[in-house]
Image (tube, helix red, strand yellow):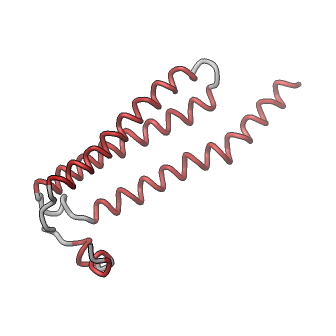
Amino acid sequence: MNLNLMLSLEYWIAIRPLAMTSKTAIMLSAFFILMIATGIACRAIYRKLKKNDRFMSYVWRRGASALNWMGSLGLLIVFFRYEGVPMLGMRLWYAAWLIGAIAWGAQIAWYRYKQLPKILAANHEVAMK
């Protein structure tokens, strides 16, 4: 793959990009299906933790939701790209998907590592009184 081509704007906003190969479609589909399966597993962990640790279960629920939504959107993008649908098959959607996935993951990590310790400390102080 030519790196200069990937860095050009025309590569990302081509309304009718070149057809996706079957191998690429299978690999991307497998990745997004794995995301959905991981989201389902996270949902099961959430249900187990819901009664005992409601704050940590909230993190698992948010992670499951992110994985399921992003996996489903990714499959939809692969479908449109593989079928060659103009506008909806643009490579730009992969970049938008990646930015969304990073933002959603960062928001979950921020809650887990910044907000949750403060919430747990506040609850611990209330319980000690």
- The front one of 36 and 88 is 36
Residue at the image position 28 percent from the left and 44 percent from the top = 30
Q: Quadrant of the C terminus?
A: top right
Q: Which percent across, then down, holds residue 58?
A: 56, 32
Question: Which residue: 12% across, 58% down?
Answer: 85
Q: Residue furthest right?
A: 129
Q: Residue at x 61, y 50 (%)?
A: 110
Q: Position of residue 100 (x, y in %)?
A: 41, 55
* Residue beneath the point at 35% across and 56% down: 97
Of residues 4 and 102, the one nearer the viewer is: 4
* Callout count: 0
* Placement of 115 over or under 126, stated as above or below: below
The foreground one among 55 and 35 is 35
Q: Is residue 126 left or right of residue 11?
A: right
Residue 65 percent coordinates (x, y): 43, 37
From this view, report whether residue 113 is shown above or below residue 119.
below
Is residue 5 left or right of 112 when viewed as pictured? left
Query: Dividing the picture into quarters, in which one does residue 1 lie?
Result: bottom left
Residue 96 position, x and y percent, is 35, 61
